Amino acid sequence: MTDVLNSLILLLVAAIAYGTPLLFGTLGEILTEKSGNLNLGVEGIMFMGGAIGLGGMFYFEKLTGITSYPLAVLIALLAAFLAGALASLIFSFLTITLRTSQNVTGLALAIFGTGVGQFAGEMMRIRVGGYVSLSLELTNALPASPFPQALQDIPYIGKLLFGNSIFFYLGILAAVLMHLFLKKTRKGLYLRAVGENPSTADSAGISVTRYKYLATVVGGGLSAIGGVVYIITTAGCTWNNEGLSGVGWLAVALVIFCLWRPLSALWGSVLFGALMILYMRLQLPFIPTELYKILPYVVTVIVLILSSLRNNKEKQPPEGLGLAYFREDR
Amino acid sequence: MGIGPYGYSYNERMVYLEYAIELRGITKRFGPVVANDGIDLGLARGEILALLGENGSGKTTLMNMLAGIYLPDEGRILADGRPISIRSPRDAYAHGIGMIHQHYKLVDVFTAAENIVLGMEGEKKLDIKKANARVREICERYGFDIDPEKKVYDMSVSEKQTVEIVKVLYRSAEILILDEPTAVLTPQETDRLFAILRKMREDNKAIVIITHKLNEVMAISDKVAVLRKGKYIGTVNTAETDPHALTDMMVGRSVTLNIDRPLNPDRAERLRVSGLTVFDHEHVKKLDGVGFTALGGEILGVAGIAGSGQKELLEAIAGLCPVARGSITYLPPEGGADELVGRTPMQIRKKGVSLAFIPEDRLGMGLVGSMGMTGNMMLRSWRRGSGPFVKRKQPRDLANKVLNDLEVVTPGIEFPVRKLSGGNVQKVLVGREIASSPSVLMTAYAVRGLDINTSYTIYNLMTEQKMKGTAVIFVGEDLDVLLELCDRILVLCGGKVSGVVDARTATKEEIGLLMTSVGGKEGA
């Protein structure tokens, strides 16, 4: 009995580690989509966030010689956020100002960002000769829990509640803040109005362009943090060209899965994290691992079918999602 | 009658005190089209002004300039005698002007109160309880019946309208403009709305209702301002006028157009419609027991205020919209009778019932903008070919024929039709429909936005078809054109047939009255 419970806890802890990058990717995309922008470039944004976040930490440590856990966390978050924000700024300019198709632009950004991330990562690797890696101290500290060992040693719940990386707790904070922003503040209401019905928002005197830009840029930055979190928590703080592939797409699927709700993203990302690693933990004979890997997508499809069958107005995507707004289109 | 605010000799200061908002010489152009031509109008507090006019007379455009949607090209707007400029809806609210548009601007997944506070300045934290309380307070004061916490998607049309009105009152508007507020309401809901409007009048607010329903004008307004084709005709006191006088002001004198109208002696019944009832997506009845016959060798005009069911009528005949009740019988020239209800558009088209539907955006239905004339011709003929490859020769010949016969101005038949001028696009569309030599040809707004000469080309094409024995159904907006082009005119009002008149003897006033009231009962 204890064995089952223990392995379940271990699975959950691992699921959280794999789910944390998804959590950031999804939260960012929820914010973006709440403004009516469908940014399919999350995959590229996360690649950029991963490579540039890692690069930031690596060069900071190398150039200054300072090995500091809090500074490294801060630099990782900041560098990744800026990279993602910049990529989303390009996306915003194209789709909001120039009103290009969001689907096409998003796909282009996914390809572009993946390329930029791989290029930056690879360049760093060649320059260093070998592979990019942080000091052993940081590599061990970053994915570890920020809480004292005593807390983690509480039977069963200690590991689960206090044994995760700092990024998971930051992710929870971000999700709660985003929930409060969207539901309880005036600006949040206006942002949702922009995503639902931009012409109504416009005629109410809300600047549709400003809200869309801000939400998309901040959302892209958040998604990009997911990239660097992935590198830190699951890739051992080294760059690997293929490591991040598919995570961004999963984040896009997860947005649909959790019906555009930041709080649902919390358990949704852990569930998706579990589905991602299930093949390592639960091997069934004759079932190839590839089948396991499609599980998150299968679940998303089922959720999509169920939510459209129920035809519940509250569980639909923002009505203006994916559509460019042009005031004179009346 | 026909005297504007400037027809009276007046003391300027008195006018300043009298009018909350005054428009002076307002002109608005959209490209070459003059939507409003030097209009003067005054809105007084404690008064309900009805702004009356046919479709396209510029009522909504004029009011949109007060609401901050459009900017006037010329003229001034005065608020309590001081010139103001209204550049956005926000500016309009700042001056106490609120407009309730015909298409409600509401977010479906928000509650009433959330919609009402949208865009307002205020504290960062959204105090929805406070907003709910204020909404309830306003509702109590004016006798509205809405729950501030109800979601918009659960609301009826009338409730949505109430939310829009409360939204305006919440912003402490003193001047309310309602654009065709009764168009979507039931008679009971209309009565309730009018009671509310009267209450607001007692509250010393200035109210404008844009309408073309004469009975409502008589019922609710204190004064009536009439626009016709973008021009201001005059303002009269409702108590001193009657629907006939207002119709005269609204439609004006007949203009002679000299459209050639030969009589085709060979007329035969081609289409028999009876009891046709159609509902739209929102289960609103769009056609209600419509019955008529269309004869081969005649042009049957269809008149009516926009949205009276013209579009649904044509689409029902073409098989594009589902028929709830009634029958549409097609009587081919070679004899026999065919029921069209339940057939697919393709089957109906094959029988020779052709629809050249020209919607508001000409390229929306019927043509593919980025393809040339040849490609667009092929959209009708591709079924004729066999094998996997398209044959371009026939459609190319047809395109050339349309090009020459109708004098389409284009750099070439492969030139994207999107880039042609409106008139030429129309010619391509009508030319293609005619080329299939249909026995029933339906057109809607075939001359919308066209210049005079091109319009005449289209009229002549219709007449040519009629002389060949085709039954032409011509949905039009301009009564002068309908009276001179058609043989008979079917008048629709609120989805019902309010009359069929002989276009050779009918008068514009007669049709005008039929358009605004079923059987002349309501308005007259």
Image (tube, coloured by chain):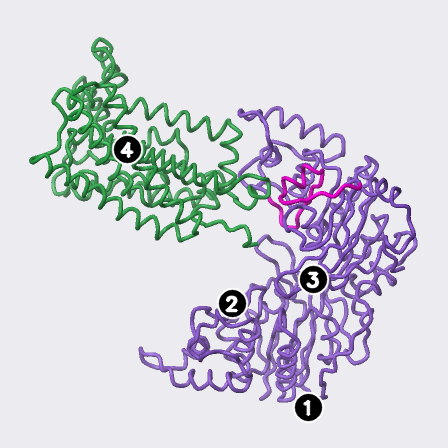
Chain colours: A green, B purple
In primary-sequence order, the first of circles 3 and 2 is 3
Residue B74 makes an appearance in the image: yes
Q: Identify the amino acid type marked 2.
A: Leu
How would you rate the neighbour count of disc 1 (Cα within 10 Å): few for under 14, some for 14-19, many for 20 or more?
A: few
Q: Which residues are magenta?
A: B81-105
Q: Is residue B92 magenta?
A: yes
3D distance between C-alphas at marks 2 and 4: 46 Å
Q: Is residue B98 above or below residue B40?
A: above
Q: Identify the amino acid type marked 4.
A: Ala
Residue A253 makes an appearance in the image: no
Between residue B350 and residue B487, name the one nearer to us: B487
Circles 3 and 4: CB distance less than 8 Å?
no
In which image quadrant can residue B226 be found? bottom right
Between residue B311 and residue A48, name the one nearer to us: A48
Q: Chain of mark 2?
A: B
> Badge 3 is on which residue?
B56
In which image quadrant can residue A317 be found? top left
3D distance between C-alphas at marks 2 and 1: 35 Å
3D distance between C-alphas at marks 1 and 4: 80 Å
Circles 3 and 2: CB distance less than 8 Å?
no
3D distance between C-alphas at marks 3 and 1: 36 Å
Q: Is residue B257 above or below residue A271?
A: below
> Badge 1 is on which residue?
B266
How would you rate the neighbour count of disc 4 (Cα within 10 Å): few for under 14, some for 14-19, many for 20 or more?
A: many
In which image quadrant can residue B354 be found? bottom right
Q: Identify the amino acid type marked 1.
A: Asp
